[in-house]
Image (cartoon, grey):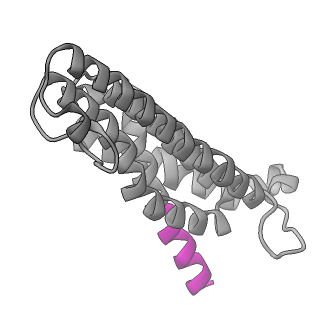
Amino acid sequence: MGYTKLFAQLPFLSLVPGYLELYVLPRYAPALSSVSSSGLPRAAGAVLALHVVAGVWIVVWGLASVGAKRKHYMEKARKDGEKDVDTRYALPNLYVDGTSVHARAFNCCQRSHQQVFESYTQFSVANLAGAICFPLTALLSASVWFLGRVTWAKGYAASEGDAKKRYTSPFSYGVWTGLLSSSILGLMSAAKITLG
């Protein structure tokens, strides 16, 4: 998927649902757009719950996956006669030094987990900001991001060292679609709050 196709999807994941949520939903499904005693839309609670549950799960699942892959590739490296396996593969090393097949394969798995820490903060701040005014659209965007994150990580871990294979599933692009659509939603929410 190219950047043009990715950006072409954004209106359908943020602008169109945001418009429908703001102007159509209150008329036809007022319960979905009702406000809680906190002053936030009730549906924003679902976005918070998704972030708490899926966010913790993504981190723990990734941690367990990397730990298992570290042991797996250490054993393969030993079996194939690589030198300094314990020094290169063991903790506290984040990545494995070297360009062997096993080192590249493990490093791809580690990279998939590390990238969560590099992008989750930006995604969650933008998505939660969007949920203030557009909770159902933010929930859709977050679901796309979490699905994309899982399929992207699985593709990366199964790549056996070929990082291009992280996009073997079309859902892998949800990482970028969810991030960009959440950013748009966050800006839309900020504009609505600022401009009234």
The percent position of residue 133, horizontal first and vertical second, equals: 66, 67
Identify the image quadrant of the C terminus.
bottom right
The percent position of residue 9, horizontal first and vertical second, equals: 39, 42
Region of the chain picked out in magenta, as a range: 184-196
Q: Answer with left or right where residue 99 lies relative to residue 122.
A: left
Name the residue: 77% across, 58% down: 45
User: In this picture, is 102 found above or below 129?
Assistant: above
Q: Is residue 164 visible?
A: no
Name the residue: 56% across, 43% down: 60
The percent position of residue 102, horizontal first and vertical second, equals: 21, 24
Q: Answer with left or right where residue 27 lies relative to residue 111.
A: right
Q: Which residue is at the front of the view, 132 or 150?
A: 150
Is 192 part of what is drawn in magenta? yes
Quarter-wise, where is residue 180 in the image? Answer: bottom left
Q: Is residue 99 visible?
A: yes
Name the residue: 34% across, 45% down: 91
Q: Examine the residues drawn in magenta and state their main secondary structure.
A: helix
Name the residue: 60% across, 42% down: 57
